[in-house]
Image (cartoon, grey):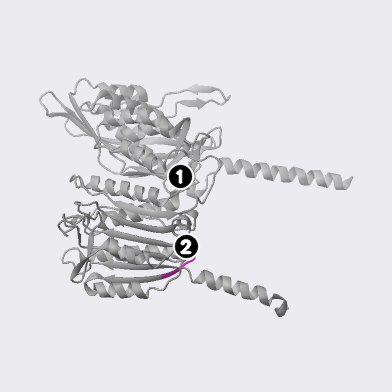
Amino acid sequence: MFKKNKGLLIILVLICFQGATQSIRTILIADSKHPELGKTYERNLVMMDSVFSEIAKNIHYDYLPIAVYAHDFTEKDLDREILHLPINTDDVIVFYYVGRGLNPTHQTTQFPSIFLKDTYLQIENIHQKLNNKGVKLNITLIDCNNQQTSRQALTIDKPLVARSIFVENDILRKLFKESKGNIIISSSKKNEKAYGSTNNGTYYTIAWLEALSQAENNNVYITWDSFLKDAELRLQEKLAQDNKNNLQHSQWQITTDSKDPITPNNTPTVSFNDTNLFLNTLANEKLKYDKREKLMETQMKKFFNVDAEANEYINAIDNNMSAIPIEDFLNKILINANLIKQINVVENLSTFSQDGRYQIITIQEIR
Amino acid sequence: MKKIIYYFIFLGIYSLFFTTKTFAQHTEPSPEQLTEFKELTLRRVNDLTNYIKQIGDKSLPERPRLKSIQLAMSLFDTVYYNSDGEKVIKMPTVQVSRKDGSVENIPIKQYFNTLFKLPHFPKVEISSYDVSYCSDFEKGMDGNYHATAFYYQRFKGYDQKGKVSYESKDRKAIEVTEKPNAKGKFTISFGNISVIETTALSPN
């Protein structure tokens, strides 16, 4: 009996062994000795560590983190870590830094330099070193200033939109398991600062995590580009809530190759991000009512079928409530803009008409 | 023959069970859904108080104020079916407290239209002074689920000189009904609004 299945058993063991060696390797660095913002950066690091650990669990990868503090970590230490990083072509490497950063005007690069112990390092060089490891997916995410000064601007605490628990789905698989290539992201463009709140962390990291959570729970379709656009939209919402006209825009360069995880019957022709942006603009009470009303009248047909309807839920996704006509729903957003903090489109509970516009859109309103 | 009779009895019981189950799936909300109804009801109550605030706010352009009337009206159930199953249009009413301390019932549409005009007050401010509350939903004799929601409304009417000429605080109760529509989905609708408590703060 054993002899008969010996070959099969060996293959199974090999498959299991092969599966177990796929990993998400993270190098997470926080500028924790920063006199005012060190604790905030540490909090960001802990959040990122926890999220990537959950992602690895979700896609059945090992999770191998290196979490360090910038004041203990020199350029040599980083080079050594990168050099000794075990190479498995199926691995994912994530390099995350939060802390002091700068980009002097004489430098031609659009991406900033990060601060390690006693020196500033150009992030594109680090990203290139990690690319040279030849892993399947290499993500570099930098949350710091991208201008002459390295001092980040953090404001008083703001309540955050609660993140939900990760559940297994196609979105994480699509982003982290099926994507191949490299991505470099910085939280601010050249000559911009990175903003945040003292207790919650830097806005971009929070926006990035929120976008990931929303995508994982709400989206059917995802690409790295659409995901990062959503993070950018959420960053702008947070800056707008501060009401200080602060300028900060994330930027990214992507070289990936991935397949669509799902091919539903009716493929949407409207972008999830554009729809989210449209609804959140209608709910932005800082814009004049007339302007928002005009936007609604001119743009609603782009997103919604003539007889489209909207569903709303708070906690119970199967609440069995009747949907309301889309025009009533949009008017409701216009008038209740003063009550609404954010609108999240739940794409995976929405349906599309044959021409790809929303037939039933499901949303969650955060008040 | 006996076998055939048993077969039909079984089929009858099975059909009855199956029909009941299907019916129940469409009309009986789960405890989680009832909790969600309650939360959604509070959202709708907050919407209503926000519409009332905007209808009365003369500093706003007319368009959003008129749209607020339309949206506020859409929250109320104006269609009923009598015991013969005939469709009846019935406008819910709202109790309003007067300057002299009396309370009057007026149809909800008239209430919103009056609030829109209020010619005696060049400036009107309507706000909430406490958090709204909703009782648990309970099944009524009509098969629908009913609850009562409470909201707290402060009214300030200003005269030409910009001074408060009338101010009152009302605690109001609103009837709420959850009922399935033709598709078996539930709708939240409001009925009559009554004044539970009223305090005139600066009666002139």
Residue A53 image position (x, y, % from top left) = 40, 66
- In the image, A284 versus B55, the foreground residue is A284
The image quarter containing residue A109 is bottom left
Residue type, numbered disc 1: Glu
Q: Mark 1 points at which residue?
A: A347
**Residue at mark 2:** A58
Q: Could you say where residue A270 lies in the image, as x and y percent from the top left?
A: 43, 38
Q: How far apart are marks 1 and 2 (CA)?
A: 21 Å
Assess whether residue B171 is covered by the magenta stretch.
Answer: no
Q: Determine the chain carrying the residue at label 2.
A: A
Of A318 and B128, nearer the camera is A318
Residue B17 image offset from top left, x and y in percent? 68, 45
User: Mark 1 packing: few (<14 Cα in 10 Å), some, or many (20+)?
Assistant: many
Image side of residue A13 versus residue A277, left or right: right
- Between disc 1 and disc 2, whose residue precedes? 2
Residue B191: image location, x then y, percent: 42, 31
Please state the extent of the stretch shown in magenta in the rendering.
A58-63
Horizontal relation, residue A359 to residue A48: left or right: right
Residue A289 is tagged as none
**In the image, B62: left or right of A94?**
left
The verdict on a common chain for dots 1 and 2 is yes
Q: Is residue A112 above or below residue B176?
A: below
The furthest residue to the top: B119
Q: How many marks?
A: 2
Query: Dot 2: few (<14), some (14–19), or many (≥20) neighbours within 10 Å?
Result: some
